Image (cartoon, rainbow, N blue to C red):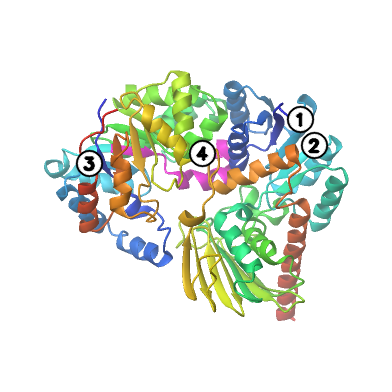
Amino acid sequence: MSIDRTVFGDNQFFGINHMSQDKAQERAERFAKLDNIMAVYDHAIDAGVEAIMLNSNDRARSICDRFRAEPEKYGHLRWYPSIPYPHKYANLVSEKGLVGAVNEILFAQGAKSAFGKMLRGGLAVATMDAFKLMKMLIDQEMEIFHGLDVRVVFLQNVIVDLMLGYDVPDPFIAYCEHIKKKYGAYPGLITQNMPMLRAKLIEWGIEGVVICSSINKIGYWMCPDRQAYDRVFAENDGEKYPLMAMSTLASGAIAPIEAYEYINAHNIQSVVFGASSPGNIRQTVSLIDPAEQPT
Amino acid sequence: MNTPLKLGIIGAGRMGITHFSIANAHENAAVVGVADPARLVTTMLGKYTGVGTYKDYRGLLKGEELDAVLVCTPPALNPEILDAVLEARLHAFVEKPFMLAAADGERFAQAFDAAGLVNQVGYVNRWNDLFTKAKSFVEQGLIGRPLRFRSEMFSPTIIRDPGDAGWRSTHANGGGAVYEMASHALDLIAYFFGTPDRVGGTSLTKVFSKQVEDVVSSSLFYESGLAGTVYVNWSDASFRKPTNKFEVFGDAGKLLVDQHGMKIHLAEANEAEGLKKGWNEIYITDVFSSVPFYVRGIEYTAQLYDFIDAIREGKPVRCTFADAAANLRVIEKLFADDASLRAGAEA
């Protein structure tokens, strides 16, 4: 399977700037305007980016609308959505419990939607099959990306790692099958525990999954430690488990040249990065080796 | 010591399912039972993880042979639950704010200690690498004698009318910005300096909530002369996620720290810590510790694995029932101070 070597992420628009509160505020003000977000995408496309990773957050729909509106300009782009938008669920779940939150999210679709019909038909969320429910929630998130050329659908780490702790294959199998079947895309899993997740996928016989994780020289957000990741790079089959690196600069703790030397030297298939100035975008694209390292 | 510790989860809400995952990934622990009234959750967990599921704590304590429980229920329910846990002689980790009344908290602190049971409360900031580092700087005297502090916490939790549904809507259930958020900001103060002796100038204000406060501010005083303020606002839409900010001024320097970074201004350089005279900046990427398994943050794993290690190896507990009970005393003083200031203003 082949995935894009360089993918342009969205953290520069919505992420927290860990280094400075003031910078974070500046950024929030700048990217409150959709035009400013689109200008950054245009810089990235000018720099040669052809693949975009976007979380299904509260801005994603209007961003996707802009891309859909100009197929001649943007139609060639390949999409790597990540779902769900964790903040949307977090408060709802603490407030209303899991069942209440699911009810609220599905009801938000309105009574005429498929969910509304099912619920009016007397099917209560509390007694529904969990995986059926999961697929409905996925489809609702994925609706944001309709009409775009979706290549990989990533599940956010807060869910992946939660399920990984339970040590049960079923939800992973169900997720991967649904993404392949319904969207003709590769399933992707984001994790902060890459070696453990990969080992479990092998144990469970789940293949053809893109694993996206923090990968950086200082071992930040790499559990249990960088050495365990290095051992995976040495033996991983990038066809069965393509690896995608995120947090390559470790929130700015590593200079770009040094950061991508580390990435380029290892058996890593893809890199997702975020930057907002044309100079930084061009520099990053040029620092990521275009050729995949041989396994 | 090779048999895994058998854990039960009481309350499978957001924290309960998180702790389940983290604890289950520990090589010397296994979650064997879960109690929650939500059938969707227990059915799902039971079917796929194979744990015993129960609609309440009574069934769990009766049905499973346990070493310890993780109590993640709304705090008003906790005294009843902990009475049963104590009777069953189980170690207990309880989510913050532990419970609602300080007297209850003190009773359980004494009883669990007397029974030799490990007891811990989930004030997770005590496991954040930057707060821990900042505390060690203050204790080493890097900024001299601490004189003033400021403990703040902001979040966009309640940014519109939340209605009356949900357990958060009343104090009787443990809702409100004092129990849910100021408790964290107050715990950070206690983590650094111990329990304050006096509170004053408290103001609790509603923004969107009907029955509980959304904004909390107060001053806290120590007999030693140390004093400071707490300011908590969970209706602040300018923050994207909960953020703690902590500042300490001492006679030899100043320190500002949050979950991601620290700025420290020193009158004199400190070679041992590699800090220069004037401003220094330290980021989480400079001080992070590693954990074997990550779900929501390094600190969540660290706190739970400390609990497991405390049971297995007798290691000390960083946040005990007694710590949380002392925090509830401060919370009671805040409520009383606000009430008396309002009464005074009306008279």
Distance between mark 3 and mark 2 Cα atoms: 56 Å
- Nearer-N-terminus badge (3/4): 4
Distance between mark 2 and mark 1 Cα atoms: 7 Å
- Let me know if marks 2 and 1 both belong to one chain: yes
Name the quadrant of the C terminus of chain B: bottom right
Q: Which dot marks residue A100?
A: none
Please state which of residues B28 and B10 is positioned toward the viewer in this rendering.
Answer: B28
- Let me know if marks 3 and 2 both belong to one chain: no
- Return the x and y of residue A251 as percentages of the image width and height: 39, 54
In the orientation shown, which residue stands out farthest toward the left?
Answer: A72
Instruction: Tell me the kind of residue under disc 2.
Output: Leu
Q: Is residue B290 left or right of residue B61?
A: left
Q: Quadrant of residue A234?
A: top left
Dot 2: within a 10 Å radius of its alpha carbon, few (fewer than 14), some, or many (20 or more) residues?
many
Circles 2 and 1 in contact, beta carbons < 8 Å: yes
Residue drawn at the location 66% of the way across and 67% of the way down: B139
Point out the frontmost of discs 1 and 4: 4
Give the residue pinned by disc 3. Answer: A289
Chain of the residue on which disc 1 is drawn: B
Give the residue pinned by disc 4. Answer: A224
Give the residue pinned by disc 2. Answer: B90
In the image, which residues are magenta? A80-105
Give the residue pinned by disc 1. Answer: B66
Chain of the residue on which disc 3 is drawn: A
Residue drawn at the location 17% of the way across and 49% of the way down: A47
- Return the x and y of residue A231 as percentages of the image width and height: 42, 32
Circles 3 and 1 in contact, beta carbons < 8 Å: no
Q: Secondary structure at mark 4?
A: loop
Instruction: Tell me the kind of residue under disc 3.
Output: Asp
Q: Is residue A219 left or right of residue B154?
A: left
